[in-house]
Image: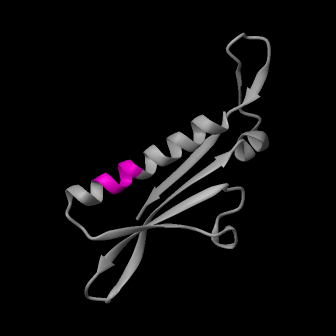
C-alpha cells in the first residue's frame, strides 16, 4: 500500500545515506521537484556528495518511489490479506554511481 511504500522509500534513502556517513563523505539529500523526477516516480531523493576538486556537489545516488505505476505496466500483483482480491505491488528504485 501507499503508506508502506513511502516508509520503505524513506528507509532505502536512509540506508544509502548511512553508507556515506560511514565513509565520512560530506553529502546532502535533495527532494526533486516534479519536473526533475523520472517518468512514473511519485517522489525522488537525489543524494549528492561534495567533490572538493570540482568545488561542487555531484549526484551519486537517486532513490524513487513509483507507487503502483510500474506494476500496472508489468501486471505485477499480490493477493490481499484475505486472499479475496489482487492488488498491484508498489515499486521502489534506487541507484548508485
Quadrant of the drawing holding the N terminus? top right
Quadrant of the drawing holding the C terminus? bottom left
Q: Is residue 87 above or below residue 79?
A: below
Residue 97 painted magenta: no
Left or right of 55? Residue 46 is right
Residue at x-position 44% and y-position 44%: 11
The quarter of the picture where residue 64 lies is: bottom right
Rendered location of residue 60, percent (x, y): 40, 67
The quarter of the picture where residue 96 lies is: bottom left
- Taking depth in this image into account, of 84 and 97 the one nearest to the observer is 84
Residue at x-position 72% and y-position 41%: 68
Rendered location of residue 16, percent (x, y): 37, 53
Rendered location of residue 42, percent (x, y): 67, 55
What kind of secondary structure does the magenta stretch mostly adopt? helix
Residue at x-position 71% and y-position 18%: 79
Rendered location of residue 40, percent (x, y): 72, 56
Q: Is residue 86 above or below residue 53?
A: above
Q: Is residue 90 above or below residue 54?
A: above
Q: Which residues are magenta?
A: 14-18
Left or right of 23? Residue 13 is right
Q: Is residue 96 above or below residue 36?
A: above
Amino acid at each position: 500500500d501507499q503508506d508502506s511504500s513511502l516508509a520503505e522509500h524513506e528507509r532505502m534513502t536512509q540506508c544509502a545515506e548511512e553508507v556515506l556517513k560511514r565513509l565520512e563523505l560530506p553529502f546532502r539529500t535533495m527532494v526533486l521537484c516534479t519536473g526533475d523526477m523520472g517518468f512514473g516516480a511519485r517522489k525522488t531523493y537525489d543524494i549528492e556528495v561534495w567533490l572538493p576538486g570540482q568545488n561542487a556537489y555531484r549526484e551519486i545516488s537517486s532513490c524513487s518511489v513509483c507507487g503502483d505505476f510500474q506494476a500496472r505496466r508489468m501486471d505485477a500483483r499480490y493477493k490481499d490479506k484475505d486472499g479475496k482480491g489482487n492488488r498491484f505491488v508498489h515499486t521502489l528504485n534506487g541507484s548508485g554511481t
